[in-house]
Image (spheres, grey):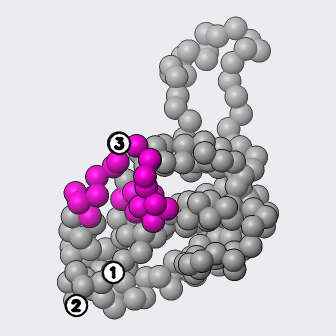
Amino acid sequence: MSDGTAVRLEPHEIALLGDGPRAAVTVAVVDLYLRGLVEADRPGTMRAGIADAVSAERPPSPLAQEVHACLHEPAGLRTLVKDPGIRLAVAHMRIPLAEAGLLRYPLLGPTRAARRHVRELRLRHPLPASRRGMTDQDRLLAVALHGEAALRLLVPRFALRAGLIRRAEVGGKGLLKHSPRGTGGGGGGSFSCGGGGGD
């Protein structure tokens, strides 16, 4: 079991091994969104929805539960990743992964076996051509493995409004410099805990 191949990983764990804590929190947010427990709020933020987390058939992961608890006030992804409760939930996630040989001590970075396992999963589960026919678990796995590309395909409006992906820039900074006053430029959303929106 020390090579990590016998361990069944959840999407948020795969995201942690592949791209770190921010990716794991993103998967937890999408999980909550798919359950109707989180929605986009002010630009770049999200908040907890009205639905009851306990009513879910399959309970959210401890990380998703901690994210949900943080989102009683609107917040952005950056704020969530820095929240002490969420950081503790990520630390607890790391323990069984380290025991399975997927994280190395003392810095808890992914081992060679973990990186190989994530690469193999990306090959076995390429980014789908469309979101039709996908289960919520399929969507979470796609987000865990393919990050922003999967967010743009599977939950584009929510991901953009909640600040999980950046808006596409049209033109360069020079374009705004030469545009007429009062016609261009929008404000960027601040990052803090919150939710809303639908795809």
Q: Residues within 10 Å of mark 3 (few under 14, many from 20)?
A: few
- Is 26 located above or below residue 113 in the figure? above
Classify residue 71 as left or right of residue 151. Answer: right
Name which of mark 1 and mark 3 comes first in the sequence.
1
Instruction: Measure the alpha-carbon separation of dots 2 and 1.
Output: 11 Å
Provide the residue designation for mark 3.
129
x, y percent for residue 36: 67, 61
Q: Nearer the viewer, residue 171 or 37?
A: 37
x, y percent for residue 166: 54, 41
Q: Residues within 10 Å of mark 2 (few under 14, many from 20)?
A: few
Amino acid type, residue under disc 3 in the picture: Ala
Q: Residue at horizontal 48%, vertical 43%?
A: 152
Amino acid type, residue under disc 1 in the picture: Arg
Task: Classify mark 1: helix, strand or loop.
Answer: loop
Magenta segment includes 92: no
Q: Residue at horizontal 79%, vertical 64%?
A: 50
Q: Which residues are magenta?
A: 121-145
Provide the residue designation for mark 1.
8
Q: Nearer the viewer, residue 58 or 117?
A: 58
Quarter-wise, where is residue 137 in the image? Answer: bottom left
Q: Residue at horizontal 66%, vertical 47%?
A: 198
Q: Residue at horizontal 35%, vertical 42%?
A: 129
Classify residue 56 as left or right of residue 181. Answer: left
Provide the residue designation for mark 2.
1
